[in-house]
Image (cartoon, rainbow, N blue to C red):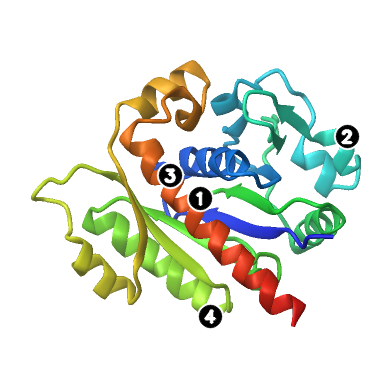
Amino acid sequence: MTTPYLIRVSSQKGGVGKTTIAVNLAVALQKDGYKVLLVDGDTVNPSVGFNLGLEDVNIGLKELVTGKAQLVKVRVVHLPSGVHVIPGVLTQKEYMPTETMLKRLREAISKTDYSFVIIDTMPGYTIEHIGAYYNEALLVSTPEMASVANVIRLATWFDREHLKHTLVLNKVKGKRYELHEKEIEEMYEGKIATKLPDDETVPISIEEHIPAYIYNKRAPFSKAMRDLARFYGARSEATSEVEKR
């Protein structure tokens, strides 16, 4: 059985396109032939279901991590893409994930044959020892100084927790006020995996509840997302080879 590769899609603040990237990365990987589970782990403002047109679902992650339902009861299939989804459900009372909840999620996922599990999380971080629950974090930033500085603080915390991370830039416009790629890489002390352009296809696709990767596969955003999916495909396969040795 394949060991699922768990990616925590993270940002230090909202508004950078974290959920959009989580959704479209899941779809792009599925279209590349991988079996993918997408989890809405934002317990404060879950929006994966909105992006996929699954707003009517009334059971999801909370029921799984609190032990009230098994994984098979809370996942749904997004038919246009084939991605399996554990949606978040808006509740009157917000709840914050605990280590016990993450352990329960990891345990449930470990018994599946997914190639990738993409988890869209709330901005920032709340759990200690987070490196034990994910293979890596995908850090999302826009190319402005405030956003980059925030995400680098998050990267520093992940380093302390021994959680590998990768940086992507979103909403890149190519304007003079944006930080240059080399400046960002010097601050981050690592390479940027992908630059995702500011593309009007994205807000249109969100309004239509259709992932941009499906809405217009030829759009600049979709082409960049395809590159990111292939980046992760190569990384997970390399990890699998190491695990076999």
Label 2 with label 4: CB-CB less than 8 Å: no
The mark that comes first in sequence, 1 or 4, is 4
Classify 10 Å Cα crowding around label 4: few (below 14), some (14-19), many (20 and above). Answer: few
Residue in front for this viewpoint, 149 or 52: 52
Which residue lies under the disc numbered 4? Answer: 160
Which residue lies under the disc numbered 2? Answer: 73
Name the front one of labels 2 and 3: 3
Label 3 with label 1: CB-CB less than 8 Å: yes
Q: Amino acid at mark 1?
A: Ala
Name the front one of labels 1 and 4: 1
Label ID, residue 229: 1
Q: Amino acid at mark 4?
A: Arg
Q: Amino acid at mark 3?
A: Met
Q: CA distance from mark 2 to mark 1?
A: 28 Å
Q: CA distance from mark 4 to mark 3?
A: 29 Å
Label 1 with label 4: CB-CB less than 8 Å: no
Name the front one of labels 2 and 4: 2
Which residue lies under the disc numbered 3? Answer: 225
Residue 126 pos. (x, y %):
60, 61
Q: Is residue 16 visible?
A: no
Q: CA distance from mark 2 to mark 4?
A: 36 Å
> Which residue is depicted at the point 41% across and 25% down?
216
Label 2 with label 3: CB-CB less than 8 Å: no
> Which residue is depicted at the point 38% across and 20% down?
204
The mark that comes first in sequence, 2 or 3, is 2
